[in-house]
Image (cartoon, grey):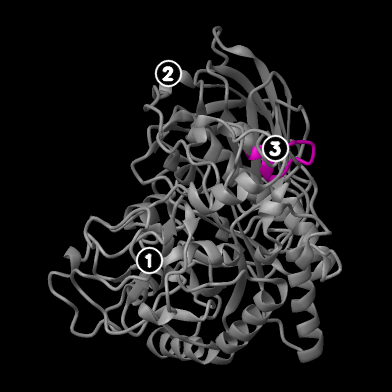
Amino acid sequence: MRRLAFALPTALGLLALAPFARAEVTVAVDPAANAHPISPLIYGVNFPSSEQIDGGRLTVGRWGGNSVTRYNYETDTRNTAADYFFENLPGCFSAEGKYCATPPADPKESSTANAFLAQMKSKAMVALFTVPTIGWVAKAPAKYSHPFDCGCKQAGQDSYDPYDAPCGNGQKGGQNSDCGPQTSTCKAVDPAWAKAWVEYIVAKLGPANGQRVYALDNEPALWSSTHRDIRKTRLGYDELWQRMRDYAVAILEADPTAKIAGPAEWGWPNYFCSDADDIAKGCSAKSPDRAAHGGVELNAWLLDQAKDYEQQNGKRILHYLDLHYYPQGGSGPARTRSLWDKSYKDPSWIDDTISLVPRMHDWASQHYPGTRLAVSEYDFYDHNSAEGTLSYAEVLGIFGREGLDMATAWGAPGAGEAAFAAFRLYRNFDGQGGHFESVSVKATVSGGTGVEAYAAVSAARVTVALVNENGGATATTVTLGSFTPGASASVYTNSGSAIQKQADVALNGGQVALTLPGKSITMLVVDGKNPNMLPDAGDATATGPGATSGPGATSGGGASAATGSGGGSASSGGGNSSCGCRIAGDPGAGELGALGGLTVVAAVARGLRRRRSGRGR
């Protein structure tokens, strides 16, 4: 449930040290400290709309989610899995496709997959593109009207599709039931099938050359639940790696210029244990499948296997460690601390320190150095409220500061929703491509509370993203360290989903004094001269709004007035589909509470998932 729209900050809120403002906060930017490149690929979303792409100058679009796990490119057909009664639906079955009123003459050539990839190429964006590895895809022929093929047709199920009466949810009395043979909706495929698809893509669009990253399926630890009509057994360490390895090799044989991401796992605790461990019984080094693999955490073990493969074969087949993340507890921007803060204990059923991005850095640096880091699904909720705007502005700042290499929001704020202002702030604050600079540096906040700051520089500019969590205006002074500024600074702040330019602010003694409106996000832009040597961005390049990414780097460039600390944590570095995968069904409804075991966690992970789309009716 989303909250009501909030009162909009206006230019009147950005006055020099207004007398009604809260106690002064100081933000000290040090252009010489903790400098590292910000990957341009952290500004992405799943299935982006044209309005999102253009308004936010997005760099990455992801084709992913539950229903692409069984996508068949030959017929442009997907299976909705547990999201909607396990039904095979053609790509045109959507409002945009007019529900297949005119079936395509050649569904392969006019497919939704081809349209997505063509859109990414035309916008010079990187495509994070999911290839099935589960071993089954929707079978031919495609059907363009009711009744659709579905996986669970037996009598006595708990619920049925009101549009296709025989199609049920695959449960009886709340328990999963056997839906019958997989071949009722699907055909078996292997890595050779995936190779043929990538060869087809290369023939149609050319080699990837850094502009396509192939993701190895989606949330495999949930296959036995989300895809229970075809996946009859739980997936363990060995089979997961075998599938990742074989499909990655096949994809790279078809396109050696491509990059590979995996395992696209849904969340805690399946970062550490496999589905075969059955997290309803807990997850620890003593869990059976994990124990059989030396007690090593699943992600770490997968990285070990990928490293061993490269050492034995002279070829890297895993370029990105790819995970999903949905906050389970807390509220508003406070829960963004779970992305980085090693002192923050998650106030949900997790009841542990998550510190997601530093944890991912540790896995990569200790088990397969050089592996990049991706979070291909995340959602910080509250899309049309001030809390969501603040949260997304902090998330994007944290991703840059902590050295994440790629990120794509799931069910991202729409271009007209308040929280989308965060993407505009970092990527298009002036409506003409003005953006947060590309080298993260240290920003230290002191004084009052409730202000977060993230800083980035180039040779001739400093940009500082300022997030005021306070309900009232907050007087803020920004110092610029060794940077030699011009006479004035430009200021941009949010108004609804838009970003508006405010009056310029004069500099005095190399510092800027301004008042941040309550519950607002602001970009401070100062031109001048940076005397400091900038770090090499590695292989990061940008073409138009899109880019390829180099590996992440170390340390942070942001800070919190709440903690009074500077620079964050240092880290070692390196559409139309439904996902589910978050446990918190209504993020405003509080947490699940303390759990003696993980039985409820497993049940909720497989059941109470917040869905993005159903049948499209």
Residue 410 can be seen, yes or no: yes
Residue type beneath disc 1? Phe
Q: Nearer the viewer, residue 425 or 93?
A: 93
Tell which residue pokes out farthest to the right in this image: 294
Residue type beneath disc 3? Asp
Majority secondary structure in the magenta region: loop
Q: Secondary structure beneath disc 1? A: loop
- Alpha-carbon span between mark 3 and mark 2: 37 Å
Region rendered in magenta: 336-345
| Residue 246 vertical placement versus 586 (above, below) | below
Q: Pinpoint residue 244: horizontal percent, then vertical percent.
A: 63, 78
Q: Secondary structure beneath disc 2? A: helix
Residue at image x 63%, y 71%? Answer: 235
Which residue carries the number 2 mark? 12
Q: Determine crowd level at label 1: few under 14, some 14-19, many 20+ residues with C-alpha closer than 10 A.
A: many
Which residue carries the number 1 mark? 86
| Residue 261 vertical placement versus 404 (above, below) | below
Q: Is residue 565 magenta?
A: no
Q: Looking at the rendering, which quadrant does residue 221 occupy?
A: bottom right
Q: Determine crowd level at label 3: few under 14, some 14-19, many 20+ residues with C-alpha closer than 10 A.
A: some
Q: Is residue 340 magenta?
A: yes
Residue at image x 37%, y 74%? Answer: 113
Which residue carries the number 3 mark? 346
Residue 533 can be seen, yes or no: no
Marks 3 and 2, the one that precedes in the sequence: 2
- Alpha-carbon span between mark 2 and mark 1: 54 Å
Whether residues under marks 3 and 1 lie with C-beta atoms below 8 angstroms apart, the answer is no
Q: Nearer the observer, disc 3 or disc 2?
A: 3
Residue type beneath disc 2? Leu
Q: Nearer the observer, disc 3 or disc 1?
A: 1
Circle number at residue 120: none
Marks 3 and 1, the one that precedes in the sequence: 1
